[in-house]
Amino acid sequence: MDKLIIRGGNRLSGTIPISGAKNSALTLIPCALLTEEPLTLRNLPRLADIDGFQHLMNQFGVTTVIQGGRPEDFGRVMSLEAPRITSNVAPYDLVRRMRASILVLGPLLARTGEATVSMPGGCAIGNRPIDLHLKALEAFGAQIELTAGYVKAVAPGGSLPGGSYDFPVVSVGATENALMAAVLAAGTCRLSNAAREPEIVDLCNLLVAMGAEIEGIGSGDLTIHGVKRLHGATYRVMADRIEAGSYACAAAITGGEVLLEGARVEDMGATVDALTAIGVAVEAEKRGLRVAANGPLRATDLTTAPYPGLATDMQAQLMSLLTRARGTSVLTETIFENRYMHVPELARMGADIAVSGRTATVTGVERLTGAAVMATDLRASMSLIIAALAADGESEVRRIYHLDRGYERLEEKLQLVGADIQRVGDD
Ligand code: UD1
């Protein structure tokens, strides 16, 4: 298994190209199930999760073609075409490897009137149930049955009649599934307290480009008037706001200055506010977002929340940055109950962090020291890279398959701005 060797201390400076958003891509790809015509997605990141999802789509009879894209380029174009759905079953062996597979439930149900998807099970950052996905589909008229670890959803008569659902808590995944199910309903579907994340807006924009009728895009109240059929489209995946935020933290912890090329400031409000509070200068430019850390880093208190609040996907990276800030910061994680697995690893590098329930108290330290570390999820792994970039000496970050799931060619991008980072095989 590969690992990354990082020698800390280099000040990052230059330009980092920001890739297409993983979390957006993983909900745009299953939209191919909703039409007989081709769907072409541009700016897809080269990631293990995208390859996995492509494989899953093939399972349903979707043909996929990756076009162009020299190996040295970032991003890819994928065309997906599903003239006929040959299977509406997502088996356990594919679903267990990738939680996002649950997102095929809504579109398969909408297209074929029936879908059977293995339940995804637990994962490293908490319980992650799917009850809200199922309740929303039920509210639209689906019959749901749970047997032998599988969810079977049926639209009596072949299409969902429509209905209303008010989410008791904001769920990104359940909003996505409900939207993809609703667009081909016989009637009208309404969602309140729906997720408003930029990736949801990206999904709505694609669905509208395919002929869907959706009102309230960008708000928590969505009204979807079902249409008989959707057509193909060509669509560019939005820039990855979490990747951009991660590199902003990486540059800031080294006292560096980088241009995050292609990043969209309008999607990154809460992250920009957090960086500003920490004393990092952030400025929107025509080509992207410029981030500069010229003075000392300051402690600040941060709480994760659904959009437009601070993304839970930024918590670990900002925590790393705060390990080097002056003073004491309090971080509160409100989305997932078990998302501090990076803390013991950061402590091994010299960070001073005390966790109590959903709260982490970070007291800034003068120096971090390089160490061998590993993490159990994607963003936690990134937080270790950020700490390693500022640590004295050499760090070894293991289990980097997590990073390959979510950061396109991470070490190359960091090398572009002067980081001393290398991928080596583990023997
Ligand atoms: C969540 C994050 C998203 C992040 C992703 C990967 C939020 C609101 N969502 O999305 O920003 O990119 O993880 O880290 O920040 N829940 C239920 N029942 C359900 C579905 C969810 O109780 O059926 C709960 C979850 O346990 C969680 C909350 O709702 O506490 C939000 O979960 P959800 O948004 O669905 O998770 P993801 O879609 O994975």
Image (cartoon, rainbow, N blue to C red):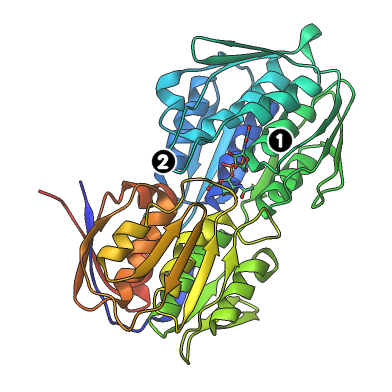
Image point 44% across, 70% down: which residue? 362
Q: Which mark is residue 232?
A: 1
The residue at the far front in this view is: 356
Image point 50% across, 83% down: which residue? 298
Which residue occupies the foreground of this view, 312 or 89? Answer: 312
Return the disc, 1 or 2, that comes first in the chain's sequence. 2
Assign a secondary structure to mark 2: loop
Query: For the residues marked 1 and 2, what is the alpha-carbon distance in whole angstroms?
Result: 36 Å
Q: Which mark is residue 163?
A: none
Which of the 4 image quarters holds residue 177? top right
The residue at the far bottom in this view is: 295
Pointer 2: what residue? 124
Indicate the position of residue 413 as horizontal and vertical percent values. 38, 67
Indicate the position of residue 272 as horizontal and vertical percent values. 62, 73
User: In the figure, is residue 217 to the left or right of 75?
Assistant: right
Question: Comparing marks 1 and 2, which lies closer to the viewer?
Answer: 2
**Mark 1 close to ligand 1, CB under 8 Å:** no
Q: Amino acid at mark 1?
A: Gly
Q: Residues within 10 Å of mark 1 (few under 14, many from 20)?
A: many
